[in-house]
Amino acid sequence: MSITAAILLGILVNCIWGFAFLVPHLLSDVDPILITLGRYLCYGAISVMILATWRGVSLAGMTRSDWGMAFALAFTGNVGYYALLVTAVQLGGVPIAALVIGTLPVTVAVVGNIMQREFRFRILAPAITLILLGLVLLNGHALTRTGDDVAANRTLWGLLAALGALVLWTWYGIRNAQYMKARLHVDANAWSVAIGIATAGLSLAALPLILAAHAVVPAVNLAVFADRALLLGLIAGSLFLGIVVSWLATVMWNRVARVLPIAMAGQLVVFETLSSLVYAFVADQLWPTLIEIASAALILTGVVLGIRATLRVAARPARETMS
């Protein structure tokens, strides 16, 4: 696959991932834990079906180390990340969650650079400054416009959940790309299936713990099972998230990660942010406020500056970059 094809495929993948923000927004009356479990149980089920029926996919070459990494990535990139993301969407709203996650291009570049030292940090200073200004403007506006302490607390917790999701996916994006490059014997389709099975395993392991905790202190809203329309929405959303947003997108992303440099691949996540914002505003039939537009403009400008800076560095000889 050429670099141009990998970039285009990466953009498509991130537009698909944008639906991960829309589904919990549309299912705002469904508990985020149930949405997370539904998505990843479906992802696991389709992974097992593919393994059983698709002759081209085999996990025979997977080592204990490979499985350990698959479970780590299943938590940081799937179960833990998405549970925090859904919580952020339902508490803080899509714009806050999307724009916090939208800083992934820079966090991946910065953390990836700490781990591999590919360029000097000062080249990202303008990008980071703009992104921080945008986040302060957006979240300050969101916290002050709520009008009461309860709503402000919900927004604050939503922001914290989004930041937690950001940390988890930053680690996932870097380690998955590193692993795909280092383990060329692992097929991209097989790796997606392995992560899907690991994700389903984590979800199944969490289910009895969640139910046991709920029996002591009700923490999961199970009202969805008494509402036929909500239940059908949860089932449809889980199938779409599990098959399209999880399995199909993961297969495509693994191919992208094998071709593109880590910093470049991570920066394509800006298209997840853009698409999720567009989906949410279309679904709500609303226009963003001027402050939301200004915040998004600052953040996205910072991301674009970060992309351009790292691409320029990537094009230079290594000795010039580190001089």
Image (cartoon, grey):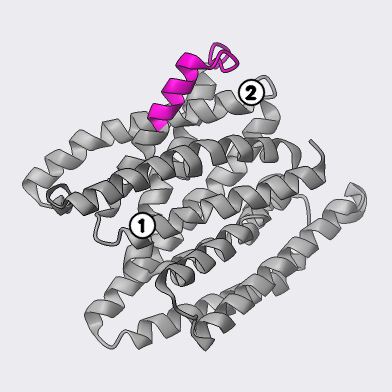
Estimate the x, y position of residue 322 in percent, counting from the top left. Answer: 85, 54
Identify the secondary structure beneath mark 1. helix
Vertical position of residue 41 compared to residue 279: above or below: above
- The image shows a total of numbered marks equal to 2
Classify 10 Å Cα crowding around label 1: few (below 14), some (14-19), many (20 and above).
many
The question of residue 201 being in magenta is answered with no
- Rendering quarter of residue 122: bottom right
Tell me the kind of residue under disc 1.
Pro
Tell me the kind of residue under disc 2.
Asp
Which residue is more in the foreground, 229 or 245? 229
Left or right of 185 in this view: 280? left
Identify the secondary structure beneath mark 2. loop
The residue that label 1 is drawn on is 24
Vertical position of residue 24 compared to residue 234: above or below: below
The question of residue 55 being in magenta is answered with yes
Residue under the image location 67 percent in, 67 percent down:
303
**Quarter the C terminus occupies:** bottom right
Q: Residue 304's mark?
A: none
Camera-side mark, 2 or 1: 1
Q: CA distance from mark 2 to mark 1?
A: 32 Å
Estimate the x, y position of residue 257 in percent, counting from the top left. Answer: 67, 40
Query: Would you say residue 112 is visible in this rendering?
Result: no
Which residue is more in the foreground, 161 or 289? 289
Looking at the rendering, the stretch of residues picked out in magenta corresponds to 44-62
Vertical position of residue 183 compared to residue 260: above or below: above
Q: Give the residue furthest to the left.
A: 216
The residue that label 2 is drawn on is 187
Residue under the image location 45 percent in, 53 percent down:
20
